[in-house]
Image: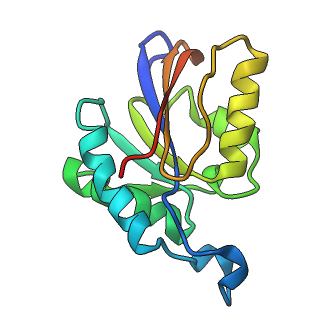
């Protein structure tokens, strides 16, 4: 994708998952709750008017499950990437921006927090949170985020 083309990144925090402390086993395998699955389905309608050419996700089950309905509705495959994984930090996400195109990306609360802090430090107006199932709509031009808009979680 050319760097001078405007595109949109939909940065989604995974929907509601079971309580971390109650989960036995590898946390990467912790799934969405019934409520989280409803949120994931509701994202399809909430993001219906948004341009999406790619769906990227942390490989954690809860993230993949969050964007499965969206990918299915758009006829797209989910591209799993460690750049969106829990603990990845801001820099792997920043490397995704220039070539992302119009992409939905599912990640974790810690990465979302880092992105919001980064946007704020760069003078991009951020007014919203990082609730599970929420989305940040990022407008990008020439690899630079121009604006950010918060969408609260559906359902």
Q: Is residue 81 above or below residue 148?
A: below
Q: Position of residue 94 (x, y in %)?
A: 67, 32
Q: Position of residue 60 (x, y in %)?
A: 57, 67
Q: Where is residue 49 in the image (x, y as percent from the top left)?
A: 24, 30
Q: Is residue 73 left or right of residue 123?
A: left
Q: Which residue is drawn at 66% across and 50% down?
A: 109
Q: In this view, does 136 lie above or below 1?
A: below
Q: Residue at x 74, y 52 (%)?
A: 88
Q: Is residue 108 left or right of residue 154?
A: right
Residue that lies at the very extreme toward the bottom in this rendered image: 24
- Of 31 and 99, which appears nearest the observer? 31
> Which corner quadrant of the image does residue 130 belong to?
top right
Q: In this view, does 15 lie above or below 110?
A: below
Residue that lies at the very extreme toward the front in this rendered image: 155
Q: Can residue 59 be seen in this view?
A: yes
Q: Which residue is drawn at 27% across and 51% down?
A: 76
């Amino acid at each position: 994708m050319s760097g001078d083309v405007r595109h949109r990144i939909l940065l989604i925090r995974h929907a509601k998952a079971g309580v971390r402390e109650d989960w036995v086993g590898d946390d990467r395998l912790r799934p969405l709750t019934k409520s989280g699955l409803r949120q994931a389905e509701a994202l399809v309608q909430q993001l219906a008017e948004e341009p999406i050419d790619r769906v990227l996700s942390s490989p954690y089950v809860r993230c993949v499950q969050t964007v499965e309905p969206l990918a299915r509705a758009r006829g797209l495959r989910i591209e799993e990437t460690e750049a969106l994984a829990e603990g990845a930090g801001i820099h792997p996400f920043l490397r995704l921006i220039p070539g992302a195109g119009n992409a939905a990306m599912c990640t974790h609360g810690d990465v979302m927090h880092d992105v919001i802090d980064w946007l704020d430090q760069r003078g991009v107006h951020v007014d919203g949170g990082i609730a599970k199932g929420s989305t940040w709509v990022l407008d990008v031009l020439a690899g630079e985020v121009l604006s950010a808009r918060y969408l609260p979680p559906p359902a």
